[in-house]
Image (spheres, helix red, strand yellow):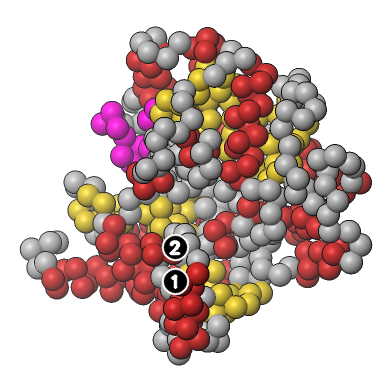
Amino acid sequence: MTPPGPRALEILRRDSKVLSPYNRPFYYPFVACSAKDCIVRDVDGNQYVDFNSGLVAMNVGHCHPRIVEAVRRQVGELMHYSYTDFYYPHVVELAEKFLPKTPGRFEKKVFFGNSGAESIEAAIKLTKWHTGRHRYLAFIGAFHGRTIGAVSFTASKPLQVARFFPTMPGVTHVPYPYCYRCPFKMTHPECNFYCVDFVDDMVLHRYVPPEEVAAIVFEPIQGEGGYVVPPPGYFQKLKKLADKYGILLVDDEVQTGMARSGRWFAIEHWDVEPDVLCSSKAMAAGLSLGATVSRSEIMDWKAGAHCTTLAANPVACAAAMAVIDVIEEERLWENAAKQGDYIQKRFRELQGSSEMIGDVRGKGLMIGVELVKNRQTKQPAGREVDEVLQKCFKKGVLAISGGDSTIRIAPPLTITRELLDAGLEIMSEAIAEVEAERKRAHPAVS
């Protein structure tokens, strides 16, 4: 049945009457009903290959039996009593299991919340408390959440901050190392990371006193910004800049963590140890859980300075511990790296015959395929990306976009080569169809 089917259309009609519009107009009318591993079904019985992992939350696949059993067992014992004022063994056990997976050869502590945005909010408050400083640096193209603090660091789309001014004061955005679209019109490695020198010479020496900056907040790979991957050596140089002024590094791994990039956390690709790390999404296989990890000496705020009633409920903790076990026992970072390299190889080969594919980038199963109207001008092909995603949806692949015109490919880390090939074939066909349609509509475009 061609989606959306009759049951889906009925849900859409009812939805529009009672629910906030969220983000759904940006993609397509998919109405999920059930899922198993890398296959998702809609309410009309259509099935799809999941190329976005439920917005990068289902790294271990949908309804993994180990996760289902852990949740089922915990639901029958204890669902909530509030770690804010009392104690759970589950929280201690999760912290002891989770902290050794995070980067940094030093003692750490963790604050558990309910989401990625909450983990960023906790990081903001923690770094303010510890340093006594109140300014921050963040990056153009970043996405850190939509609560009023987190959205102050977000700089992905104007809509995300429209009508919410003023947001939290003190956040200055600087250029991210987006080499395909370098804002300084330079080329790596000849640029010698001028984007870092710019922060030092033109920002911290001109209008942002470095002694007032608490932290630099960054994504090791920008997510909603278009799966933008900094070049080797970038974060080492940024770390030197931060150390020069006693500025903390806050690493947002909400999308990139839990083996998504081929490492437990993406910053490990650059061999840099952040002072604070934020995680969520895939931590508990879609259940609400977030984490803010820091060096033990940084987490020096007093009891009651920050808390939240529903944080680290036992069910989410049980799921998270099972997620860690599954990733470790199945060595999913290896499959992420192997299949991710294969995806990039496939699209670089396709790039030879497709004028619309401008750039292919990524690490692990976090791949960005940027489409352009013209390879010379690099004009973003936003409408064409939308058309490709619609065609993929009709043909049985669920994918989303990022940045101005990048297709994001992020299937569960459990995906097999056979299923991956099936999904990539559909996506390649969709790109070829859109490109052919564009050429028919604009014959002068070569």
- The stretch of residues the image draws in magenta is 174-185
CA gap between label 2 and label 1 equals: 7 Å
Q: Are marks 2 and 1 in contact (CB under 8 Å)?
A: yes
Q: Is residue 294 magenta?
A: no
Q: Position of residue 150 (x, y in %)?
A: 53, 38
In this rendering, the count of numbered labels is 2
Q: Is residue 278 left or right of residue 398?
A: right
Q: Secondary structure at mark 1?
A: helix
Q: Say which residue appears at 28% left-offset and 63% top-offset.
A: 384
Looking at this view, is 191 or 252 the one in front?
Answer: 252
Q: Amino acid at mark 1?
A: Ser
Q: Secondary structure at mark 2?
A: loop
Is residue 183 shown in magenta?
yes
Instruction: Tell me the crowding category of disc 2: few under 14, some 14 to 19, or many 20 or more residues within 10 angstroms, Cα based.
Output: few
Q: Quadrant of residue 180?
A: top left
Frontmost residue, 268 versus 36: 36
Residue at image position (34%, 25%) is: 191
Residue at 46% across, 76% down: 12
Disc 1 packing (10 Å; few <14; some 14–19; many ≥20): few
Residue shown at 39% from the left, 9% from the top: 205
Observer-nearest residue: 44 or 76? 76
Visible in this render: residue 215? yes
Q: Which residue is mark 1?
A: 16
Q: Name the amino acid type tagged 2.
A: Pro
* Viewer-proximal residue among 408 and 357: 408
State the residue position of label 2.
21
Residue 185 in the image: above or below residue 426: above
The answer to whether any part of residue 268 appears in the image is no
Q: Residue furthest front?
A: 18
Quarter in which the C terminus is drawn: bottom left
